[in-house]
Image (cartoon, helix red, strand yellow):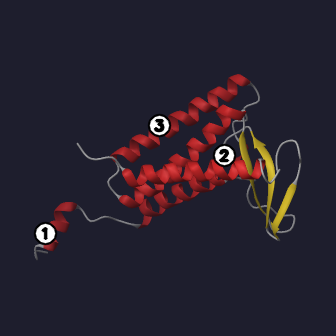
Amino acid sequence: MRGLPRLGLAVAAAVFALDQALKWVVTGPLGVNILSGRVIELLPVFRVQFVPNRGVSLGLLHASTDTTRWLLVALTGAIAAGVLVWLWRERARGDQVALGMVLGGAVGNIADRVRLGYVVDFADLHFGDWSPFLVFNTGDAAITTGVLLLLVRALLVRDKPAAKRVSVENGNA
């Protein structure tokens, strides 16, 4: 039996903790929350504003009732469980890191939806009046980055088959 994918699980825990901590800082001490309507312009291209996200990626599958909310929790929970199984079986450390990012971000968003009924989004990247992204959070950024890393590895990085690698290492070509 192989050992635990410690690196991937550590990344997932770190992403989850950072996601929840930043959401708490934004909605608590900074006062950017559902009641205040406050917006903080940090840079000419980046502001912090509260947006309750009742859907999933790109505002799809909007959960407007308790039933749809819990269906979304179940759906995203099943996806997170699938990512955890993949992580558990993954040997490549780079893929473990990417899967840990996806898992940590997903669990952070699931925790929001269970606790609040929506996901706390607060990061708004914009260029004047043009916003190339929806308002997002740390978990969303981790999920997107993890998926992109997995895609890059799948499309551009090829591992040599083990038999060929052993043959080359022994001086046989």
Outermost bottom residue = 171
Dot 2: within a 10 Å radius of its alpha carbon, few (fewer than 14), some, or many (20 or more) residues? few
Mark 1 and mark 3 lie on one chain; the one further toward the N terminus is 3
Q: Amino acid at mark 1?
A: Ser
Q: Residue at x 15, y 67 (%)?
A: 166
The quarter of the picture where residue 48 lies is bottom right
Q: Residue furthest front?
A: 29
Residue bearing the label numbered 3 = 81
Relative horizontal placement of residue 116, taking residue 127 as reference (left or right): left
Question: Local crowd at mark 1 within 10 Å, few (<14), some, or many (≥20)?
Answer: few
Q: Crowding near pointer 3: few (<14 within 10 Å), some, many (20+)?
A: some
Please tell me whether residue 57 is drawn above or below residue 169 in the rendered image: above
Name the quadrant of the N terminus. top left
Report the Cα–Cα distance between label 1 and label 3: 38 Å
Mark in the foreground, 1 or 3: 3
Q: List x then y, in percent, for residue 18.
A: 60, 53
The quarter of the displayed image where residue 128 is located: bottom right
Front residue (pair 67, 117): 117
**SS at mark 2?**
helix
Q: In the displayed structure, does residue 41 sit left or right of residue 80?
A: right
Q: CA distance from mark 2 to mark 3?
A: 18 Å
Residue 56, percent across and down? Answer: 67, 41
- According to the image, label 1 marks what residue? 167
Amino acid type of the residue that numbered disc 3 sits on in the rendered structure? Ala
Instruction: Point out which mark residue 140 bears.
Output: none
Q: Residue at x 52, y 56 (%)?
A: 146
Query: As drawn, is 78 to the left or to the right of 173?
Result: right
Residue picked out by circle 2? 57
- Going from N to C along the chain, the mark reached first, 1 or 2, is 2
User: Does dot 1 land on a helix, a strand or a loop?
Assistant: helix
